[in-house]
Image (tube, helix red, strand yellow):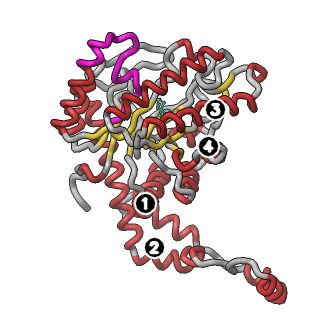
Amino acid sequence: MSSSFTPKREDKFAFGLWTIGHLGTDPFGTATRPPIYPADFVRKLGELNVWGVSFHDDDLLPYKSTLAEQDKIKKDFRKALDDSGVVVSMSTTNLFSHPVFKDGAFTSNDPQVRKYAIQKVLNALDVGAEFGAPTAVFWGGREGVEAAGSKYPLDALERYREALNYFIGYIKDKGYKMRMALEPKPNEPRGDTFLPTIGHMMAFIETLEDPSMVGINPEVAHETMAGLSFYQGVAQAIWQKKLFHIDLNDQKIGRYDQDLRFGSEGIKDNFFLVRMLEKTGYSGPKHFDSRPYRNEHGDGIWEFAKNSMRNYLALAEKARAYDADPDVQAAHKVSGHDTLAQPTIGGYSSDSADKLKQEVFDADKLAERSYFNERLDQLAIDHILGLK
Ligand code: GLT
Ligand code: MN
Ligand code: MN
């Protein structure tokens, strides 16, 4: 077992300015940590061998900052990127903090607010393009309701689609080399959010003008909040070639959005997640959308960053050992695991259907089989616990 789990740039780990740099605010309390200047943040990422940095428009260029201030921030940020070799891996738009978005952004009942939201995104896309961000993320935090009767949901979905189609047009018109990744979340801050899960989001994408430009950015915490298996959701996204980006963090089921350090809670789920990302050759950013505990300060926030990457690398190593283990391979055999990769009957033809109807199945006999899942699952636990 490797002793250090030190990241390399080719691991493609990334952090958002708002993640390690989170001030520790929560709905009940104000900041517990000072802000970090974006250029300093990037230099520190470089020291830790982090590959990418992401940002919201307002993280980089604070609301109401003057043009001169913005120029200085951007110049310093550019220099830090060049000096450190860190790349901008994604950019996004804050459509949730300002009170103007209290009723939603693309789905606000006020058309002026909706237009303002679209304008804010166009400006954010320009900033993302300026720094070479290949992906624009859309998290519709305020797109939802508390009062169910306040928005007719079919209209809201239509307005959501209108906005995204507009951005498809803008990105093409400007010739930006950028794809969009939509991030679902079931609730919080709204009581009910539109497009709440990976499945809803992927179905919605197919209704857009150019679905090939749009994929998803699923987050561990968000799917877990909904009581769903993140692993299964991500699997479908990979299968449908829609995993454009991923937000790695951790979460206890049934809680508010905790954004915990990756690998600190749902270890078995994360083990299988990392195994799948590695096996399928996911080549996008491994982006940590998490934040240090509110009572962490100083060096502790960078320790949090290092351990997020360390947990990923450690789980990847455990997954490799699991797959190489002859006991696991034997358990796969008796469980029938590998035969699932073989076609059942192939495409339909009337001949094959006639033949199938002639076949005799002894369902009672077939039902007697054991799939030895207890053994197989324990092998995963043994590997995770370091017993193997
Ligand atoms: C916000 C949210 C995250 C999203 C960010 C992208 S904003 O921090 O909680 O899940 O990924 O807009
Ligand atoms: Mn979250
Ligand atoms: Mn996220």
Q: Is residue 60 magenta?
A: yes
Secondary structure of the residue carrying numbered label 3 = helix
Task: Kindly check if marks 4 and 3 are in contact, taking CB atoms under 8 A apart as contact.
Answer: no
Task: For the C terminus, give its image quadrant.
Answer: bottom left
Residue that protrudes farthest toward the front in the picture: 173
> What crowding class fits label 3: few (fewer than 14 Cα within 10 Å), some (14-19), or many (20 or more)?
some
Q: Image height check: is 122 above or below 231?
A: above
Q: Amino acid at mark 4?
A: Glu
Q: Position of residue 169 (x, y in %)?
A: 54, 36
Q: Which label was assigned to residue 162?
A: 3
Circle 2 residue: 328
State the separation of the CA atoms marked 3 and 1: 37 Å
> What crowding class fits label 2: few (fewer than 14 Cα within 10 Å), some (14-19), or many (20 or more)?
some
Q: Image height check: is 232 above or below 255?
A: below
Task: Kindly check if marks 1 and 4 are in contact, taking CB atoms under 8 A apart as contact.
Answer: no
Part of the protein shown in magenta = 53-72
State the separation of the CA atoms marked 1 and 4: 34 Å
Q: Position of residue 8 (x, y in %)?
A: 24, 51
Which residue appears at 45% of the width and 45% of the height?
246
State the separation of the CA atoms marked 2 and 4: 45 Å
The answer to which image quadrant residue 185 occupies is top right
